[in-house]
Image: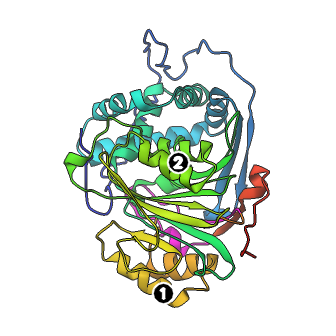
Amino acid sequence: MERHKSGRHIVFLAVMVVGLSGCQPQATSRGDGLVLAAGAVSSTPKPEIRGRLDTIGEGEDAIDVLYLSGSPYEMGYTHGKLLADKIRKFYSVTIMGMSVGLGVPVARLDEAWAAMAPFVSKDLKEEMRGLADGAGVDIRAVQRAQAIPDLSEFHCTFFAAWGKATKDGRLYQIRALDYATEAGIQNYPVIFVYKPDGKKPFVIVGWAGLIGCITGISGRGIALSEIGDNFGNEKETLAGEPFPFLLRRVLETADTLDQAVRMIQSARRTSSYLYCVGDGKIPSARALMTCKDWAYVFDPISLPNRHLDDVVYFSMGADSQWNEKIYDALKPKHGQIDERVAMEDIMRGLGTGDLHAVAWDVTGLRMWVANCTSAPLGTAGRPAYGENFLYFDVGKALGVQPAMPAGCR
């Protein structure tokens, strides 16, 4: 099954269709117990809530912050319980928007999930089951929502700069997410603070009801950015590990830049993506160009764009003219790059990151997040890059002290 392409964005049409696909009460069941209709009684004993819900920012800037800990099922259940109303609304947008906007039945999302499911870990499936139980939705709605990112393209921007390129030697990295804001996805933003049992703690910038990583950083100082691309339909498949689950696996388990890169290289990948993997402890970063068949890794010297010392970057695709824009904006700031350059000169200055815009001081475990403003379905919100960037102390949230490598200040 191929991904559906539509240029820079997936444009959602008729997203105001009445109904909450997969979330209305239904008398459905299946022998494996994975289908839980809204209102049905699960055989799993309900756990205690292992987390809390906070907020940063005010008014239009406000973003939920959800703290989760415990086993996979406990984290999923807490997620579902504390954000139940928003999860139901978000699923109605993503599932109906994808189905109607692309002119395909919801059953195609079920086909996509069926292709991916064999490559999804037991832990993530347990978390999804907990999410369905906590929110009181059909497990199929949860599955459909997780399948959507691998069917979509996010034409975005990232760069990572460190050493001689930055004002203090630290690693600074961005993830500017450009996607259709008419779909109302921005109405349900969440910063997830995960402290899973037996795994590394991490933070994901995402949305209610999604458990994969589109944008994230771990307590080990590993930061991840992503851009969608297309190197030919013959190089794409859905029979692989969904990319948000792959990136989450990196956050949960990787200690070093080399480990993170090897995990992406060795994964059973799905479609065409560009990645940026940064390690604030060294500090350094790599850009990757991947599809199901290959994964190329670039440092600043081998990068197939114009070179800047201690910088890797891509924007809107491997062959996009936006790569020249990024170079032209970064070059005069070389040696002085910091979070302000990331936010003001690159994202706001060039106009990239309309759905959400994130800047990291990866070395210092600090983050700044801007979100697109809420808007009625079918109407674009104001782009994130033009809104207020909210500060979030990643290290404090995770209970981790950042490691300050030699040469950084």
Q: Residue 270 location, x and y as percent?
A: 34, 43
Q: Secondary structure at mark 1?
A: helix
Indicate the quadrant where residue 156 lies: bottom left
- Inspect this view and state whether residue 191 appears: no
In terms of secondary structure, what is the magenta stretch mainly?
Answer: loop
Q: Nearer the viewer, mark 2 or mark 1?
A: 1
Instruction: Judge from the rendering whether residue 263 lies leftward or rightward of residue 166; answer left or right.
Output: left
Magenta part of the chain = 365-388
Residue 309's spot in the image, x, y percent? 51, 80
Q: Sequence-wise, which precedes: disc 2 or disc 1?
A: 2
Question: Measured along the vertical axis of the image, is residue 177 above or below residue 193?
Answer: below
Q: Which mark is residue 331?
A: 1
From the top left corner, tell me how far across and down residue 340 is, in percent: 62, 80
Relative image position of residue 253 (x, y in whole percent): 61, 42
Residue 367 included in the magenta stretch of the image: yes
Give the residue at mark 2. Answer: 213
> Which quadrant is home to the C terminus?
bottom right
Does 369 lie within the magenta span?
A: yes
Residue depicted at x 31% and y 63%:
8
Question: Which quadrant is the N terminus positioned in?
Answer: top left
Label 1 crowding class (10 Å Cα cut-off): few <14, some 14-19, many 20+? some
Q: Secondary structure at mark 2?
A: loop
